[in-house]
């Protein structure tokens, strides 16, 4: 089986039906469970790049597995097994393609919102703050600078769009979607997950600036953490020793790619995405590998 690293979705010859194909991951229906395969594809500004990042799928999977284990006391997660030896017999001949970049997970009904937590002022949040002194409707003290740590982490949910861009929503709007009790529960869990992530990352010389979580419900109504968690695709990680107020610190995430794309003239952040030079591909890989090593992940 070939794991595609192009904008085309994986057309794998697995003996199971394709359940869903996303920008990065392909999901197969195993019956009672799902197989999630992380490809080497990478996206930015909701566009999949023509070139992939070597080993990216394995890095994302192993980093997520580290964090699922490190946070399972806060909220249960969707993992059934990460050990390829426990995969169905029908998949054993696909070891080279699947091992290290795939997991078997429980089926869950995802909430139609993404739970974003921001601990520092960066990205779109900083742009919004400069305009109105608030982030997603939450007022902040005046005088904050780029990359400043916020007085307390902010929970800023967004829609989860099937097509196009996600959009930030207020807490009240989230309550209209999932109800007040569940909104409060998801907020509390997201903040607890962020605090755990920030603490563990800080011990390893990096700052977790912001991240997003996704949750789902099992058939029995149990709430679990799904998708990915605290990966460099879903989070903003900065080198702690190079952090300073007022400037954007060097990152170990996708920001390096975004920064490169922002320098291109004539591309309107819509498909087709531009080709990536070898220097950028290797630069992204180096940053992802640096982050993985800090969490003890080896490929």
Image (cartoon, helix red, strand yellow):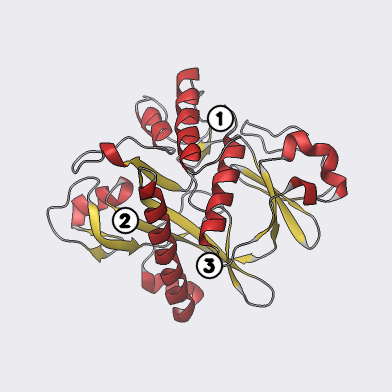
Q: Name the quadrant containing residue 283.
A: top left
Determine which residue is flagged by label 3.
Answer: 73
State which quarter of the image contains the C terminus.
top right
Q: Which mark is residue 294?
A: none
Q: Residues within 10 Å of mark 1 (few under 14, many from 20)?
A: many
State which quarter of the image contains the N terminus.
top right
Foreground mark, 3 or 1, reads 3
Residue found farthest to the left: 143
What is the secondary structure assignment of the residue under circle 2? strand
Residue 227 in the image, given as x and y percentages of width and height: 58, 55
Q: Which residue: 79% across, 51% down?
A: 86
Q: Which mark is residue 119?
A: 2
* 34 or 162, nearer to the observer: 34
Total marks drawn? 3
What is the secondary structure assignment of the residue under circle 1? loop
* 183 or 56, nearer to the observer: 56
Residue 176 in the image, given as x and y percentages of width and height: 45, 75
Residue 117 in the image, given as x and y percentages of width and height: 38, 59
Q: Residues within 10 Å of mark 3 (few under 14, many from 20)?
A: few
* Image vertical order of residue 241 relative to residue 142, above or below: above
Determine which residue is flagged by label 1.
Answer: 53
- Distance of mark 3 from mark 2, alpha carbons? 22 Å
* Image vertical order of residue 46 relative to residue 70, above or below: above
* Image vertical order of residue 20 relative to residue 261, above or below: below
Circle nearer the N terminus (3, 2): 3
């Amino acid at each position: 089986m070939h794991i595609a690293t192009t904008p085309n979705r994986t057309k794998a010859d697995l003996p199971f039906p394709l359940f869903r194909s996303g920008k990065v991951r392909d999901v197969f229906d195993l019956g009672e469970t799902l197989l999630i395969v992380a490809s080497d594809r990478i996206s930015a500004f909701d566009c999949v790049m023509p070139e992939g990042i070597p080993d990216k799928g394995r890095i994302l999977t192993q980093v997520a597995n580290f964090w699922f284990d490190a946070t399972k006391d806060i909220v249960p997660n969707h993992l059934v097994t990460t050990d390829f030896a426990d995969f169905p017999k029908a998949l054993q001949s696909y070891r080279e393609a699947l091992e290290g970049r795939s997991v078997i997970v429980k089926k869950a009904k995802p909430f139609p919102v993404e739970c974003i937590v921001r601990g520092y002022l960066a990205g779109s949040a900083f742009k919004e703050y400069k305009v109105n002194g608030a982030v997603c409707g939450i007022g902040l003290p005046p005088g904050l600078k780029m990359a400043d740590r916020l007085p307390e982490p902010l929970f800023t949910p967004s829609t989860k769009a099937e097509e196009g861009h996600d959009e930030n929503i207020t807490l009240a709007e989230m309550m209209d979607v999932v109800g007040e009790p569940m909104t409060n529960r998801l907020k509390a869990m997201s903040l607890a997950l962020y605090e755990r992530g920030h603490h563990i990352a800080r011990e390893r010389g990096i700052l977790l600036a912001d991240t997003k979580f996704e949750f789902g419900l099992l058939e029995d109504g149990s709430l679990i953490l799904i998708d990915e968690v605290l990966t460099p695709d879903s989070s903003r990680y900065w080198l702690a020793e190079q952090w300073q107020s007022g400037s954007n610190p060097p990152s170990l995430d996708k920001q390096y790619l975004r920064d490169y794309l922002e320098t291109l003239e004539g591309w309107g952040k819509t498909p087709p995405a531009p080709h990536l030079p070898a220097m950028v591909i290797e630069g992204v890989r180096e940053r992802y590998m640096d982050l993985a090593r800090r969490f003890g992940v080896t490929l």
